[in-house]
Image (cartoon, rainbow, N blue to C red):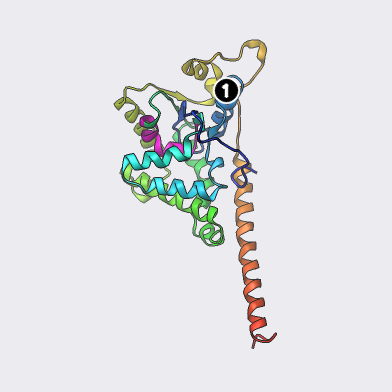
Amino acid sequence: MRFVTDDLVVDRTSSVQIQVIGAGLPRCATSSLQAALESNYINLDPCMHMAHVSPHADRGTLLLTALREPNAATRHKLLHGIFDGFQATTDFPGCMFADDLMDMYPEAKIVLNKRPGGAQKWVQSIKMLFWAGSPVYRVLGYLWKVDRNLYSVWRTFMQRSMVSFGLTADELFTAKHYDAHNEWVCAEAAKRGREVLEFEPRDGWASLCKFLGKEAPGDDDDEPFPHRNDASEIRMVQIVLYARGGLSWVALAGVVYGIARLAGGGRMF
């Protein structure tokens, strides 16, 4: 299951580097864009996505270190440890470091993937991820390093967004947040003289392939643009992680109880 397990092996010592930066926020067709970039038509496999970070304690720890690192040169070195070996990126963690990635990979194309339906649709959709920063998840997942990392990444993302975009806590995950992020991506690209493709899945293969210098599927290919609505998958991930965390606490309580009984000669009182 994505976000829970991940068997992708990436050679980080290879010369492969990011060629496409998908800079849009989560719940902005990130999985659909990932599938398109990894397709035989664009052939930028593998594509970084939070699904390749969440299951790995070491990658999560590296990501948190990068999020908290104020020095750009040091941060870039940390980020190379996350992104090198991938040919593209969408979703977290890339969208949080869009400006850094523009500097690290000056030849990379920048795609601002946007939520179909606009800001208000994003506001509705992003709510399904709120559990990752909730007190309930923090407690249930505390025994697992990957869960502690995911919680901390989400909370750090909230804090960074408030500081970077001048948002209040009440303005997080509102239309103002969505618009501020997209404006920031475009502004950072403009500073560097970089072109940005603002993209929605309904735009199809043609605009994306043209921007990337790839040949789009022909009429005879009958290949629709990928549509990966992972809402049900995310709900299942929440259930699995909550259950895993709860069962871990039960198991720990059982061990403590057993040790206490042994120490007390089989009696608790």
The residue positioned 59% from the left and 29% from the top of the image is 35
Query: In the rendered view, would you say 14 is above or below 260?
Result: above
Per the image, is 102 magenta? yes
Q: Nearer the viewer, residue 58 or 158?
A: 58
- The residue under label 1 is 43
Q: Is residue 47 visible?
A: yes
In the visual, does 175 lie left or right of 90? left
> Is most of the magenta stretch helix, strand or loop?
helix
Query: In the rendered view, would you say 210 is above or below 20?
Result: above
Query: In the rendered view, would you say 75 is above or below 228?
Result: below
Q: Nearer the viewer, residue 61 or 139?
A: 61
Quadrant the C terminus occupies: bottom right
The residue positioned 38% from the left and 21% from the top of the image is 195
Residue interval drawn in magenta: 89-103
- Please tell me whether mark 1 sits on a helix, a strand or a loop: loop
Amino acid on which disc 1 is placed: Asn
In the visual, does 158 lie left or right of 187? right
Q: Nearer the viewer, residue 133 or 211?
A: 211
Quadrant the N terminus occupies: top right
Q: Residue furthest front?
A: 13
Q: Residue furthest bottom?
A: 269
Per the image, is 25 magenta? no
The residue positioned 54% from the left and 57% from the top of the image is 137
